[in-house]
Image: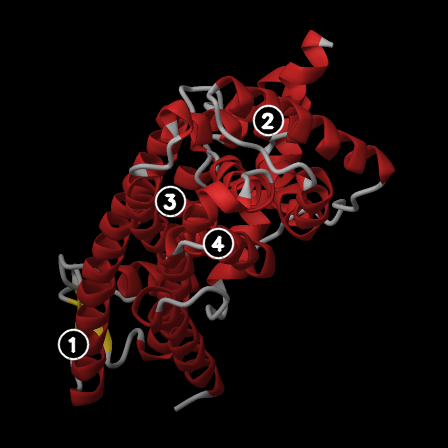
Amino acid sequence: MTSEQLAGAALMLLFLADIFLTILYARAGTGLLAPWWDRAVWMLIQAISRTFGRRRGAVLSFTGPIIVVSLIVFWSLGLTVGAALIIQPELGTAIRPSSGATPTDFVTALLVAGNSLSIVGGGDYSPHTSGTRLLYLFNSLVGASVLSLVLSYLLQVYSALRERNALAFAIDLMTDGTGDAAEMLARLMPGGEAGDAVSELGNLVRSLAATKEAHHFYPLLFYFRFNEPRYAVSRFCFVLLDLTTLIDSALDRRRYGALRDSAPVASLHRGALLLLQTLDENLPTSQARQCDGAEAWRARQSYAAASKVLGRQGIAIAPDGIDAYVDARRTWEPLVRGVAPTLGYTLDTIERRAVEERSSA
């Protein structure tokens, strides 16, 4: 076996290992090549999108599908080049066409390798030794297996994307389309009664857990962006974290202690945090996330606006909740600030209550 063939075998093993880790092992941050390829394509599209001005978001919305197509091409080319390096030294001797002379250039080797990896066979070139026959057999098995794995992977990614969007849309509906956690809480507690709030929040926990694990299994989901902010991961995570923070800080403990201490409230808070942390640790999120005095003032304004919404519904407010709300928000808002800008969203797009409060002031 020549050094060229050893290099080809190593290249094929590298790409097969990357496909295994990305599709079968399925853990965020474990791929050898795919995560870096995805980032490179993402950074390229981000750079291109800046030239489109106000239509930047529309350009970024193509990122997910483009990365899917480019990743398939990347894997296909890697396996084909590896197989071509193995095949080229055999051209003209162990691998020959049925008639005529045998070109031995690398382009011909790429053609033969691509045909042997595809389901259509080796074309006009056929193996004439036991070793090359086994190579053709191996290539055909690799090609068929990778094709079926990639198709299955894409079905799972798009199924998970649909479920994520369903969760985001359900949360948006519960806020009456405002994206305001205070509105959501007021609708969960009509007349100031906690009633079915715990069970309703419990339903969201299951969907949130599935979405969090989908991003852990399929990191590619992060790159799928929609023009409508309601579908942004940063937005529905913000709403859930804001909701649970309001429940824990703004609601009167004596009257709503059962709701404040319930498992769904704690689970939603932790689940949203874990989802944002998964994205922040494994994907190219923004580093500009410091919360300064202006942000503390913004949080106080947001709490004041939420108190008005809750008060109109007859919900009893804790007298000293504002400081607890501001302190709690400092712990999770930096994560939102890291994730949101990467997908072209501003904090004003994510937090609607503070924007509306400033507009009415």
- Cα separation, mark 1 vs mark 4, equals 43 Å
Left or right: residue 176 versus residue 39 is left
| Pick the front one: 236 or 130 | 236
Looking at the image, the residue that sits furthest to the right is 293
Instruction: Indicate which disc, 3 or 2, sits on the residue closer to the N terminus.
Output: 3
Measure the C-alpha gap from mark 2 to mark 1.
66 Å
* Label 3 secondary element: helix
What residue is disc 3 on? 69
Sequence-wise first label, 2 or 1: 1
Disc with the residue nearer the chain's start (1 vs 3): 3
Residue 137 — which label?
1
Image position of 43 (left or right of 270): right
Examine the rendered structure and indicate whether residue 288 appears above or below residue 137: above
The residue pinned by badge 4 equals: 275
Q: Which amino acid is tagged 1?
A: Leu
Judged by depth in the image, the label closer to the viewer, 4 or 2, is 2
Question: For this rendering, which residue is in front, 145 or 128?
Answer: 145
Which residue lies at the image location 49% right of the left edge and 70% below the top edge?
32
Q: Tell me where residue 105 appears, x and y as whole percent.
A: 41, 64
Within 10 angstroms of label 3, few (less than 14), some, or many (20 or more) residues?
few
Which residue ends up furthest to the top in the rendered image? 360
Residue 250 seen in this snapshot: yes
Amino acid carrying label 3: it is Val
x and y, in percent, of residue 115 in the image: 23, 60
